[in-house]
Amino acid sequence: MLKTAYAINALWVCLMVSISAIAETKRITVIYDEKPTELAAMVNNSNDVWVTMKDLARATRYVVKPQGVCRDELCFPLPKAQKSKFIVKQDSSEWFNLSEFARLIHQPVAFDEKNATYYFGTRAEAQNAYLESYEAPNFRLPDVQGQVHSLSDFRGKKVLLVTWASW
């Protein structure tokens, strides 16, 4: 059992070396909590985005601590057996896999290759908080004449929303 664990760990180390070898550093924009941050990141073939620890804190306000990845009172422990999926040392920098972290905490991510932009959406727990309050989240959309309306403009009135999608 112990040999298997060492073999798996060695495999992850080899995988991380190969990931960093095929990753390229480039300028990207990370949108986190609706705040865009431009930074240099490593992006591998699967479009995972690796950021330095300094840029992790700057873009997301998360920091890596012994107990996990934390922001304010919120802390997500990293699985010890899979730590190399999240953190890798290359040269004199430590890099953090923000894409893998998003998968760990079930956070949706959208990537726009043309604009080199990653959008990290709201976690399901935060999205579903509206279900408990029975209050729809506010949003703004234009009508067919182009005039922008906000859902909050209609508070206290009955509203029928009709949506359509081509897909």
Image: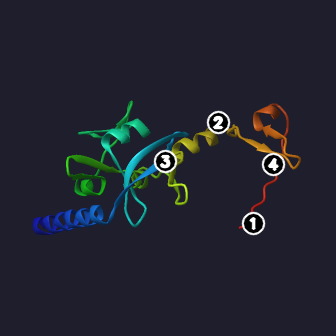
Distance in Å between CA atoms under marks 2 and 1? 31 Å
The tag earlier along the polypeptide, 2 or 1, is 2
Which residue has dot 3 on it? Answer: 29
The tag earlier along the polypeptide, 2 or 4, is 2
Mark 2 and mark 3 in contact (Cβ < 8 Å)? no
- Vertical relation: 167 (above or below) 117: below
Q: Amino acid at mark 2?
A: Ser
- Where is residue 114? Give x, y as percent: 55, 59
| Residue 64 numbered mark, or none | none
Q: Amino acid at mark 1?
A: Ser
Q: Amino acid at mark 3?
A: Thr
Distance in Å between CA atoms under marks 3 and 2? 33 Å
- Vertical relation: 23 (above or below) 35: below
Which residue has dot 4 on it? Answer: 161
The tag earlier along the polypeptide, 3 or 2, is 3
Disc 1 packing (10 Å; few <14; some 14–19; many ≥20): few
**In this image, 99 relative to 11: left or right?**
right
Q: Amino acid at mark 4?
A: Leu
Q: Nearer the viewer, mark 2 or mark 1?
A: 1
The tag earlier along the polypeptide, 4 or 1, is 4
Q: Residue at x 80, y 38 (%)?
A: 149
Disc 3 packing (10 Å; few <14; some 14–19; many ≥20): many
Tell me the SS state at disc 3. strand
Give the camera-side residue of 164 and 93.
Answer: 93
Which residue has dot 1 on it? Answer: 166
